[in-house]
Amino acid sequence: MGLKLFKSDMEKAEDEWRKAYEKGINQRKWEEAAKHFKKAYEHYTKAGNPKAEEALLLAYLFHSVATGDMSSLKKAAEIAAKLPPNTVFNIPFEITASEIANEGNIIVAELPVAVKLSKVNQLIAEGDEGKMEKFAAQLEKISQKLLMNSSKKPVLGEFFNMKEPFEKRGYRYLAYSKLLRAKIQALYDPSKSVELYSEAMGYFKIGNLATSAEGVAEEINKVGTVAKCWFCGRTIQGEDVHYVKMPAAVTPYILSKYGNEKPESLGEDYVVACRACYTAIYITSDTVARRYYEMAMQRLQEVRQELLYEIKKIWDEIERIWRAMPGG
Ligand SMILES: [Zn+2]
């Protein structure tokens, strides 16, 4: 016990460094590892040993692994960038300072984007063009960063559930950025939108995301399809965006006369309506329906009052008869 009092700062530092492995890394207890590296850093600093920086780097790194705190990872990457690039760390796999600096920065930038991407369907459903546009730009930026690193292998990603090759991740983000831009563009320029959808599909394929590519193919079909409005006769591109198929009773005669026209304007049980005609019909019929509903409700109220009056009259009559009976 007494001996420990005489340990030098250097010895204390090395003790803590060792404990960081034994009690921390080897048992996958990351916060424990961070704690001991932090102490090692303090002792190395007192001893004036340059290994202090390495200990501090690992303290920040493992704190971020334990908590997901990206500002700690950012600090670890900053320290790594100042160390000799070939400094090797065993955590427990080998990784160099330059790899920590590079991949640390990628993860810090990518993680918030990856989280946001998991809710991309919600973003699309909300349809806020400004937000979609902003996120598309963010996706492009991170995809560039990843694709620039496509020759390298992810190492640090092991700790952050980001082990997929940089290239695959890069193409996925690029695909989603094109998809978002295609959806925005669909409202303004269906032909331009089709181009963007095609690009998105290509990137989904390169990124090995077959199901997403299939979904996009379906959307391209719709945005690319041209039809003629049955009501106004205008030719419109973009099913479900700029025109819809309205259910209708189409007689065999009408179908045989107009069913083969190109672009199509009707089918067996529908007619094509451009958005303008469709919404005009919809809004008008809605207004008419509401007026009829209000009229019906008012009439119902009148009938109710009449009935209540009649019922009261009957009760009064019953009471009168009752009182008139002998002993009533
Ligand atoms: Zn129309």
Image (spheres, rainbow, N blue to C red):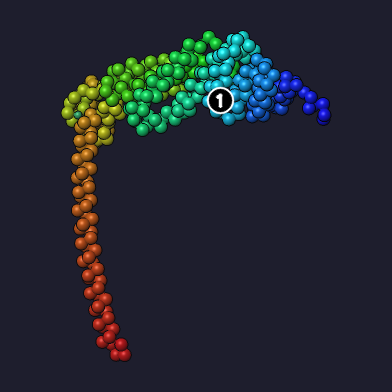
Where is residue 191? Give x, y as percent: 28, 18
Question: Secondary structure under badge 1?
Answer: helix
- Indicate the position of residue 63 as horizontal and vertical percent values: 60, 27
Disc 1 crowd rating (10 Å Cα; few below 14, some 14-19, many 20+) is many
Left-right relation of 162 to 221: right
* Mark 1, residue position: 72
Q: Nearer the viewer, residue 260 or 209?
A: 209
* Residue at x 79%, y 24% (from the top left corner): 6
Residue 183 percent location from the top left of the image? 34, 24
Classify residue 127 as left or right of residue 211. left
What residue is rendered at 36% in x and 28% in y?
131
Instruction: Classify residue 76 by image quadrant.
Output: top right
Toward the bottom, the furthest residue is: 327
Quarter of the render that holds ligand 1: top left
- Viewport quadrant of the C terminus: bottom left
Residue 291 at least partly seen: yes
Quadrant for residue 309, please give it.
bottom left
Name the residue at the right extreme: 2
Quadrant for the N terminus, please.
Answer: top right
From this view, report whether residue 316 is shown above or below residue 255.
below
Q: Is residue 310 above or below residue 240?
A: below
Residue occupying image coordinates x 48% and y 15% = 146
Residue 240 image point, x, y percent: 30, 29
Amino acid, disc 1: Ser
